[in-house]
């Protein structure tokens, strides 16, 4: 899959999985790596950028083993961004389906 195309979709997916539940970085990677064929080198920079834009807040949680984990929690601003991106994705996806269906029918 084209890298530029994938980057936009990955951001939407990260927003979605963290909107469902607070997650730490490795959990985000675990949920997205296989279905999207991506790795931590793609996900962590997006997590940092989205946090810098105020879409996520972070907090640390102690574990019974090792260092505390940094969890990501979606903010109201992040929820709004998710809604906007999801709406745009649905509209874009529908338009592509219509075009491809037209092309297949020729």
Image (cartoon, rainbow, N blue to C red):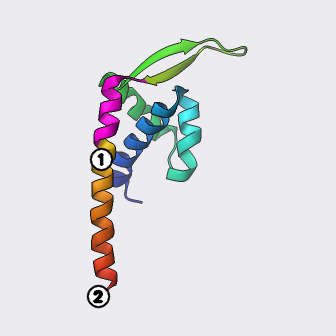
Separation of marks 2 and 1 at Cα, in angstroms: 29 Å
From the image, give the main secondary structure of the stretch colored magenta. helix
Q: Residue at the location (32% across, 74% down)?
A: 100
Above or below, 41 against 69 in this view is below
**Residue 49 shows up from this direction:** no
The N terminus lies in quadrant: bottom left
Quadrant location of residue 74? top left
Q: Which residue is mark 2?
A: 106
**Residue 2 shows up from this direction:** yes
Mark 1 neighbour class, 10 Å CA radius: few under 14, some 14 to 19, many 20 or more: few
x%, y% of residue 98?
29, 70
Residue situated in front as seen by the camera: 50 or 90: 90
- What are the residue bounds of the magenta stretch? 74-84
**Is residue 53 highlighted in magenta?**
no
Q: Earlier in the sequence, mark 2 or mark 1?
A: 1
Marks 2,1: beta carbons within 8 A: no
Q: Residue at the location (38% across, 48% down)?
A: 9
**Is residue 79 highlighted in magenta?**
yes
Q: Residue at the location (58% across, 32% down)?
A: 26
**Secondary element at image label 2:** loop
Quadrant location of residue 92? bottom left
Above or below, 3 against 104 in this view is above
Q: Is residue 64 left or right of residue 97?
A: right
Residue situated in front as seen by the camera: 29 or 85: 85
Q: Residue at the location (45% across, 32% down)?
A: 19
x%, y% of residue 81?
30, 34
Q: Which residue is mark 1?
A: 87
The C terminus lies in quadrant: bottom left
Res 9 label: none
């Amino acid at each position: 899959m084209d890298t530029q195309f994938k980057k936009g979709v990955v951001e939407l997916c990260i927003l979605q999985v963290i909107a469902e539940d607070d997650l730490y970085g490795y959990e985000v990677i675990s949920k997205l790596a296989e279905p999207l064929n991506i790795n931590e080198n793609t996900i962590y920079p997006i997590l940092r950028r989205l946090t810098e834009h105020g879409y996520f807040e972070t907090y640390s949680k102690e574990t019974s083993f090792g260092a505390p984990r940094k969890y990501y929690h979606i903010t109201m601003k992040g929820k709004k961004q998710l809604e906007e991106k999801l709406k745009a994705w649905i509209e874009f996806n529908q338009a592509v389906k219509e075009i491809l269906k037209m092309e297949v029918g020729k």
